[in-house]
Image (cartoon, rainbow, N blue to C red):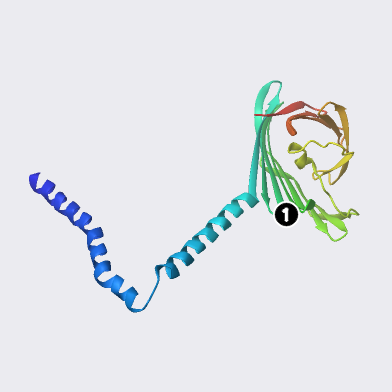
Amino acid sequence: MYYLYKTKNKHSNHIHMIPALIIWLFKKYGRPFFKKYNFSFNRFVVPVRSASVTVLFVAISSMALAQEQTLNYNVLHSGQTVGHLKLQQRKEGDDTFLNVASDVKMRFIFSINVNIREDSHYHDGKLVCSHVSRMVNGKQKANKITKANGETYQLSDDGKISSINQKQISNNLTAMYLKEPVGLSQIYSDNFQQFVQVKQTDSHTYRIDLPDGNYNFYTYTNGVCSKVDIHHSLYTIQIQLT
């Protein structure tokens, strides 16, 4: 034990001697070299310092340009939590990316597990592309794409191609979670691939009537959607901000 302790102490002393040795070597050989060739520390230190500041500025700018926001919701049926919904927004310069992922498991006569994914990409306020995918009990029930194509939008519904004569879509139903639709009379539904009417029914509450006869209420708190009441012919569920 004494031998090991003594060995460690010797090793530690050698480590502490290294910086002193480096300083001595620099004074003996490094400094005369710089003087002989008339080199200046500033020629090396200043550029390195400037480069470091530039890299730091670029890193901070990148962090400022890439902004992310996440909203989490519980899905309720008859007062019981039956699922969750997560919305993520990422901004990079003029580009905005929205992603919604919801997983709901309900039981009527038999168990139903619904997984929905919705993605939207906006550039300078214009919808560039959106995708809706819905799985029910592991089987795909919807696969819909809306894509800007010149003066129109090309639509794909499970491979069936069509289009709508619309130059720009500025808001879709996914974006309603992030911003209260003040002053909007209609909004684009990526699932139904058409515009639906927006009706204000109360202070910070809006009703959306869907083409299939169902309807939703969106309620806002501080500009962000805090609750969605979904009225379906077979059920009623609530999506509440956590």
| Along the line of sight, the residue nearer the viewer: 219 or 29 | 29
At mark 1, the secondary structure is loop
The percent position of residue 142, horizontal first and vertical second, equals 76, 45
Q: Is residue 161 above or below residue 76?
A: below
- Residue at (84%, 31%) from the top-left corner? 206
The percent position of residue 31, horizontal first and vertical second, equals 30, 70
- Residue at (29%, 71%) from the top-left corner? 30
Residue sitting at the far top: 79
Residue sitting at the far bottom: 37
| Along the line of sight, the residue nearer the viewer: 232 or 46 | 46
Left or right of 51? Residue 150 is right
Q: Quadrant of residue 19?
A: bottom left
Q: Is residue 49 above or below residue 109?
A: below
Quadrant the N terminus occupies: top left
Q: Quadrant of residue 211?
A: top right
The percent position of residue 68, horizontal first and vertical second, equals 64, 45
Q: Quadrant of residue 240?
A: top right
Mark 1 crowd level (few <14, some 14–19, many ≥20, 10 Å Cα): few
Quadrant the C terminus occupies: top right
| Along the line of sight, the residue nearer the viewer: 158 or 24 | 24
The percent position of residue 12, horizontal first and vertical second, equals 19, 52
Residue on which disc 1 sits:
94
Q: Amino acid at mark 1?
A: Asp
- Residue at (51%, 63%) from the top-left corner? 50
Number of on-image labels = 1
- Residue at (26%, 67%) from the top-left corner? 27
